[in-house]
Image (cartoon, rainbow, N blue to C red):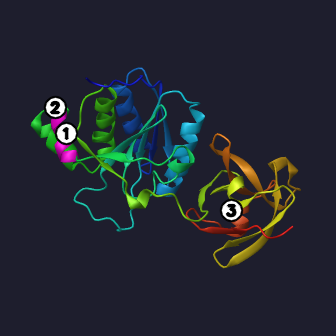
Amino acid sequence: MKKQFAQPGKAVVISDCRDDNARVRVTTRVAALFPNINVDFIGVQNDIEAAGCLVDVIDAALGRPVLILVNVAPRNGKHHRKNGSPFGYIQVGKAHIFGTMDGLSFSLLGYVAPQRGVRVYDTDEVVKYFGIPNELQEHIATSQFRSYEFLPRLAAHVLVGKRLHGKLQYPSDQEQLAAPTVWWVDVFGNAKLTVTAAQIGFTPGALVGIKIGKKKVLVKCYERLPDIPLGELGLTVGSSGFGVNRWLELMIKRGDAARALNLKIGQTVFIKNNHS
């Protein structure tokens, strides 16, 4: 018996193919395959940004059905495949997530739910079940823009309950990041970290030592941004994360923390809470 899912009213595309042409094409394609769905787009630079945004979108959905398409594979030459990373599917609550397997895009899902296997699909095999001409099957399987040609079609078939053969995998690259990392810098220069208050014993008023590259700073913990004195650097609980597990942020009130500390996405941040 086919398993059918509640039709999501919302879809979010997270992709590093983020120029205007790519963005409009892929959101239009998703809307064409899901006519009653509202589609948004998040442009990212790399898979670490994608991982944080993925958790934020699941949190924002408040448990309602949401479709999330993630197309961000590492471009550092680490993975060598015939035509890019394979795509996989995982359901977390009522969030249906389809995305690139190579890299760290799924690495922060442990903050949302215990990490489970991802069903990975062979593109050449799966296109045969799309009910399209052979010539189009070949085009999709070899396309450079598979997040446009293949990924939305894969999601459409899975969500209507059609059986597609996939292999359950637990890729080592998708494990939770071992050390706190800068995963996002917002428009104000606030740096979002992949570490929660509970993980470091965060206490408002305490001083923590932070090491970023070769730079070491002593930072005071504040419960909220408004509590940070004007122009000073502070560590506070941010708005990103899931449920009660909110990630910490480095901020300068009315300043740019990322610029002041020369922070880069993907940088490891060591936090030592031994000051008071």
Q: Are the residues flagged by discs 1 and 2 in contact, CB closer than 8 Å?
A: yes
Q: In whole angstroms, how far apart are the C-alphas of marks 2 and 3?
A: 49 Å
**In the displayed structure image, the side of residue 234 where residue 98 appears, left or right:** left
Q: Quadrant of the C terminus?
A: bottom right
Q: Main secondary structure of the magenta part?
A: helix
Picture layout, residue 64 above or below residue 212: above
Question: Is residue 127 on the magenta stretch?
Answer: yes
Name the image quarter holding residue 241.
top right
Mark 1 / mark 3, whichever is N-terminal: 1
Along the viewing direction, whichever of 183 and 166 lies nearer the viewer: 166
Q: Position of residue 187 (x, y in %)?
A: 66, 50
User: Disc 2 designates what residue?
Assistant: 132
Structural distance between the alpha carbons of marks 1 and 3: 44 Å
Q: Residue at x 33, y 34 (%)?
A: 155
- What range is drawn magenta here? 123-129
In the image, is 193 to the left or to the right of 104? right
Q: Which residue occupies 69% across, 73% down?
A: 211
Mark 1, other Cα within 10 Å: few <14 / some 14–19 / many ≥20: many
Quadrant of image for the N terminus? top left
The residue that label 1 is drawn on is: 127
